[in-house]
C-alpha cells in the first residue's frame, strides 16, 4: 500500500540531502518526493510517497523523526486529508483529428489546455495520484513529447 | 546582567569582547566541560591550534586521525563524558570516518571538529577539500557546516547538547578556515541552555505504561531482564540491580552492557547471544517475560529472529523510538530514558521469589559452564584472560579489539562494574582497542587499563602506542598472537570446510617463507616493535610466564606490551551459528 508522509523540516541547506540520504541508506523505496516552502519561511515541507507495509512505514516515520532537523512527521494516509498531484504533459497532434481526440481525453479527465502549438497541445491536470495515472494511461496511444509530474502534496482536513 | 565579583576594574557599558571563530571554538569546548581533546593539526585548523596553545584543557596528539577519534571514544566510554577531537580538512576528516561510525553504532557521545577550506573555495576541488558534510552524514548523529561566525557559539553548544542527550552519538562540526579567522561579539553558550524546536530528547513516559510494565512483572513466572548498551549510557545499572533483587529476576546482558549487572551475582547469566553463555540463551528461549532494558535486539543476540524468545511477552524500553519494533516485533514498547522508567516501576513491583525459575537457571549455569580444552604445553588464550581477571581482581578496565580476542574477553573476565568494558559492538572495528585504551586511561588515570587485542587488529593502529609511552600511561597491551585472523579462520573452519583463505598472519610454513629462521618467525616482531615505540615488552608462551609478565606490568610503572603466543586454532565456544536458534548451539561443555 502507498503511504503519504508529510515531513516538516528546518529550512536549512543540506536538509534535503540528509532526508534523501537517510531513505536511500536504509534501503527504503519512495515513489515521489516533493519539497516546498510553508507559511513559515524557516520551515520547509517534504511530502514523501512510499510503498510498504505498516512496519516499513513506521520505521520510515521513526527514522525521519529522529533526524535533528526534522520538526514533525505526519502519516497522512489514514487521516482525513486532501491530496493533489499536478502533471504537465505535451502531446503531439499531427492533424485536426488527432487534436480533437487529445482534447476529448483532456475534457473527460477535466484536464486544462494550457498551450496549443500547430503540432502539439500542452495539458495540465491537478488531481489525486490515481486520476493522474489514469489520465496518462488514456493519453498513451498518442505521442507524449514531454511530461512532468510534481509528486503528491497533501494537507489534512480534520476539524481543529 | 549580573556583574561578576572579580578583581578587574569595572567599566560601564563595556563593549562586548571581539573574538575570532577559532577562539569561540576553544571557549565553547571549555564551557561544555571539555578537559581533554585528541587530534591532529593541519592547514585548515591552524587558527584553532594557535588558540589551543592557551586553552584551559589538554591536547593529545595522536599519530593518525583514526586514533584520535577512538581515543575520544574510549575516553567517553570510560567516563560517561563526551569525547572531543579536532582534525584538519580533507584527509584529516576522512580518516575520522571509521571512528565516527564506531561511536555512532554504539551511541557514544563525541564532538568532532574538522577544518574545512574557506567558504568561497568549497566546491572548487581546493587543496585538502572533501565534502565532509556529505561523507559523514550517515555516520554521525548530526553534523554542522558553519557558514557564519555568528552561528558558531550556538552550534558548538548544540553539538554537545545533541551528542549527550537522547540516544547519544557523535556530532561533527565542519568549520571553514575563513570562519575561524572572522570575528564575532556573541558570547559563549552553555550546552544546557540550548533549546531546539526540531530536537526534543526529553520524553515523558505515561503512567499507564509504568503500571502495565509493573503488572507484567508481577504476573510473570519466568521473567528475564535483558540489559543493553542503554543501561550503561543511561547510568541505570544500580536500578537494574535493585529491580532484579526486589523481584528475584535473572539478568543477562548484551556485549555492550557487560558490567551493567555484576557477573558474580547469583542472578547473573552473563552475556546473551552468538557467543553468550548457554544458560543466558536457554533463559531467553524459556522465559515468559523478556524485558529489554536499553538493548536493541541486534542480530548477534537474536539469531533466528522469529524463534527468538518465542514463549515470552517482550518488552522494549529504549530512548531511541526507532529502535522499538525495528528488529523484533515487541509486544510492548516504552519510549523513554531507562533510569526514570525503572525508578517509577520499582515501587510498583511486588517482591517475589520465582523459586522454580531461579532454580532452573541455577541448574543451567552449573550444567553448561563456560570452558575450553587445555592441552598440555599449549598456552590457551582463554587462560590469559582468566589470569588478567585473577591478578586484577576483576577491577581492570578492559579495552578490546574485535574478533576472538574480544569474545574471549567477554567470557573469561568477570565484569562487575559499568564502564569497565570498552569495545566496539555494533560496527566491530578492528584497531579500536589500543587507542580506546589510551583514551580510557586519560579519563580514569588511577585505574588499571588493559588492552586485549589479536595479532591482526593491533597492527591496525599500533602507531598510537607512542602516545601511551610519551604520556607515561601505564596501560598493559596484551596481544593474543595465534598467527591468524582468528575469528574469520574460525568461520572458515566451521562453515567453509577449513579452507583458510586470506587469514594467515604467521610466516611459518608459508610460501615463500617455508624455511625461515627462528628469528624471522615473528613478523612483525611485536617485542622489538613495542620496544622501538619505547614500551616495555615481553613475549610469553606459558601460563607461568603470563602470570609473571602481568604481575610486573600491573605494577603500572611502564607502558607494557605482552605478546602471548597462543594456540593457533583455539575457537570461541559456545556458538550459535548466525541466524540460528539456540537449539543449534555448538561447542558448549556439558557437566
Image (tube, rainbow, N blue to C red):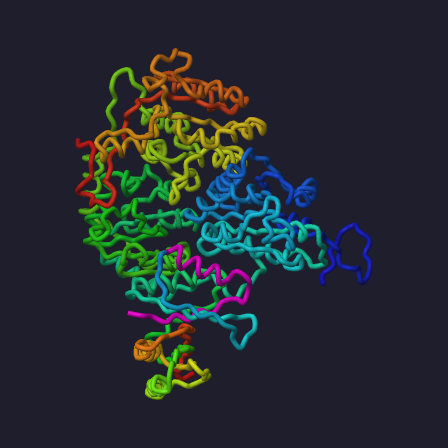
Identified at 23% across, 43% down, the residue is: B281
Q: Is residue B312 visible?
A: yes
In the rendered image, the quadrant that contains the C terminus of chain B is: top left
* Relative to B568, residue A14 above or below: below
Residue B375: within the magenta? no
In the rendered image, the quadrant that contains the N terminus of chain B is: bottom right
In depth, the one of A41 and B376 nearer the eye is: A41
Residue A13: within the magenta? yes
Q: Which residues are magenta?
A: A1-26
Q: Percent position (x, y) of residue B221?
A: 20, 53
* Relative to B561, residue B90 above or below: below
Q: Is residue B221 visible?
A: no
Identified at 22% across, 54% down, the residue is: B312
Question: In the displayed image of the protein, which residue is found farthest to the front?
Answer: A95
Q: Percent position (x, y) of residue B30?
A: 63, 48
In depth, the one of B568 and B547 nearer the eye is: B568
Q: Percent position (x, y) of residue B511?
A: 34, 19
Amino acid at each position: 500500500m502507498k503511504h503519504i508522509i508529510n515531513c516538516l523540516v528546518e529550512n536549512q541547506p543540506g536538509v534535503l540531502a540528509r532526508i534523501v540520504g537517510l531513505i536511500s541508506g536504509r534501503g527504503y523505496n519512495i515513489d515521489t518526493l516533493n519539497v516546498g516552502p510553508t507559511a513559515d519561511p524557516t520551515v520547509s515541507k517534504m511530502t514523501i510517497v512510499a510503498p510498504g507495509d505498516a512496519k516499513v512505514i513506521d520505521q520510515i516515520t521513526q527514522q525521519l523523526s529522529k533526524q535533528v532537523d526534522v520538526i514533525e512527521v505526519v502519516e497522512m494516509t489514514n487521516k482525513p486529508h486532501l491530496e493533489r498531484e499536478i502533471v504537465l504533459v505535451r502531446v503531439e497532434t499531427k492533424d485536426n483529428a488527432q487534436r480533437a481526440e487529445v482534447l476529448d481525453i483532456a475534457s473527460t479527465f477535466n484536464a486544462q489546455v494550457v498551450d496549443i502549438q500547430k503540432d502539439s497541445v500542452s495539458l495540465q491536470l491537478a488531481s489525486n495520484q490515481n486520476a493522474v495515472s489514469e489520465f496518462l494511461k488514456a493519453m498513451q496511444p498518442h505521442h507524449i513529447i514531454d511530461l512532468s509530474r510534481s509528486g503528491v502534496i497533501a494537507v489534512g482536513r480534520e476539524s481543529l | 546582567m549580573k556583574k561578576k565579583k572579580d578583581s578587574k576594574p569595572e567599566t560601564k557599558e563595556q563593549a562586548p569582547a571581539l573574538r575570532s571563530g577559532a577562539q569561540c571554538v576553544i571557549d565553547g569546548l571549555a564551557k561544555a566541560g571539555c578537559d581533554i581533546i585528541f587530534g591532529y593539526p593541519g592547514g585548515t585548523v591552524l587558527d584553532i591550534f594557535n588558540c589551543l596553545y592557551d586553552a584551559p584543557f589538554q591536547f593529545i596528539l595522536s599519530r593518525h586521525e583514526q586514533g584520535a577519534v577512538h581515543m575520544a571514544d574510549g575516553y567517553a566510554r570510560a567516563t560517561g563524558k563526551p569525547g572531543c577531537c579536532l582534525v584538519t580538512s580533507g584527509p584529516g576528516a576522512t580518516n575520522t570516518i571509521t571512528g565516527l561510525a564506531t561511536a555512532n553504532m554504539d551511541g557514544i557521545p563525541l564532538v568532532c571538529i574538522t577544518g574545512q577550506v574557506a567558504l568561497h573555495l568549497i566546491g572548487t576541488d581546493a587543496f585538502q577539500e572533501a565534502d565532509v558534510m556529505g561523507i559523514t552524514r550517515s555516520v554521525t548523529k548530526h553534523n554542522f557546516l558553519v557558514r557564519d561566525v555568528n552561528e558558531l557559539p550556538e552550534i558548538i553548544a548544540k553539538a554537545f547538547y545533541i551528542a549527550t542527550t537522547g540516544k547519544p552519538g557523535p556530532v561533527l562540526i565542519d568549520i571553514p578556515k575563513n570562519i575561524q579567522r572572522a570575528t564575532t561579539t556573541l558570547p559563549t553558550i552553555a550546552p544546557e541552555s540550548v533549546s531546539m524546536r526540531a530536537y526534543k530528547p526529553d520524553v515523558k513516559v505515561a503512567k499507564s505504561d509504568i503500571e502495565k510494565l509493573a503488572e507484567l512483572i508481577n504476573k510473570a513466572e519466568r521473567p528475564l531482564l535483558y540489559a543493553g548498551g542503554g543501561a550503561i549510557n543511561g547510568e541505570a545499572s544500580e536500578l537494574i540491580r535493585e529491580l532484579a533483587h526486589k523481584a528475584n529476576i535473572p539478568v543477562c546482558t548484551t556485549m555492550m552492557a557487560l558490567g551493567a549487572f555484576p557477573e558474580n551475582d547469583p542472578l547473573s547469566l552473563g552475556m546473551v547471544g552468538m557467543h553468550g553463555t548457554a544458560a543466558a540463551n536457554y533463559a531467553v528461549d524459556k522465559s515468559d517475560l523478556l524485558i529489554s532494558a536499553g538493548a536493541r535486539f541486534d542480530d548477534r543476540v537474536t539469531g533466528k529472529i522469529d524463534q527468538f524468545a518465542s514463549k515470552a511477552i517482550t518488552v522494549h524500553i529504549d530512548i531511541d523510538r526507532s529502535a522499538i519494533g525495528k528488529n523484533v516485533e515487541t509486544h510492548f514498547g516504552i519510549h523513554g530514558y531507562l533510569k526514570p522508567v525503572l525508578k517509577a516501576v520499582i515501587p510498583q513491583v511486588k517482591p517475589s521469589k520465582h523459586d522454580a525459575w531461579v532454580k532452573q537457571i541455577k541448574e543451567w549455569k552449573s550444567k553448561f559452564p563456560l570452558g575450553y580444552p587445555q592441552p598440555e604445553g599449549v598456552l590457551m588464550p582463554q587462560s590469559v584472560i582468566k589470569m588478567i581477571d585473577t591478578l586484577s581482581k576483576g577491577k581492570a578496565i578492559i579495552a578490546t579489539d574485535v574478533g576472538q580476542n574480544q569474545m574471549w574477553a567477554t567470557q573469561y573476565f568477570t565484569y562487575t562494574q559499568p564502564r569497565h568494558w570498552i569495545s566496539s559492538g555494533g560496527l566491530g572495528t578492528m584497531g579500536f582497542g589500543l587507542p580506546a585504551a589510551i583514551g580510557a586511561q586519560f579519563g580514569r588515570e588511577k585505574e588499571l587499563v588493559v588492552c586485549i587485542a589479536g595479532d591482526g587488529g593491533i597492527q591496525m593502529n599500533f602507531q598510537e602506542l607512542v602516545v601511551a609511552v610519551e604520556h607515561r600511561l601505564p596501560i598493559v597491551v596484551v596481544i593474543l598472537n595465534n598467527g591468524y585472523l582468528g575469528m574469520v579462520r574460525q568461520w572458515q573452519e566451521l562453515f567453509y570446510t577449513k579452507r583458510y583463505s586470506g587469514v594467515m598472519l604467521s610466516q611459518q610454513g608459508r610460501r615463500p617463507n617455508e624455511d625461515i629462521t627462528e628469528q624471522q618467525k615473528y613478523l612483525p616482531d611485536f617485542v622489538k616493535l613495542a620496544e622501538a615505540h619505547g614500551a616495555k615488552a615481553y613475549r610469553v608462551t606459558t601460563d607461568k610466564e603470563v602470570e609473571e609478565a602481568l604481575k610486573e606490568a600491573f605494577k603500572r610503572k611502564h607502558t607494557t606490551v605482552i605478546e602471548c603466543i597462543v594456540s593457533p586454532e583455539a575457537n570461541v565456544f559456545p556458538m550459535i551459528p548466525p541466524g540460528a536458534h539456540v537449539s543449534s548451539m555448538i561447542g558448549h561443555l556439558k557437566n
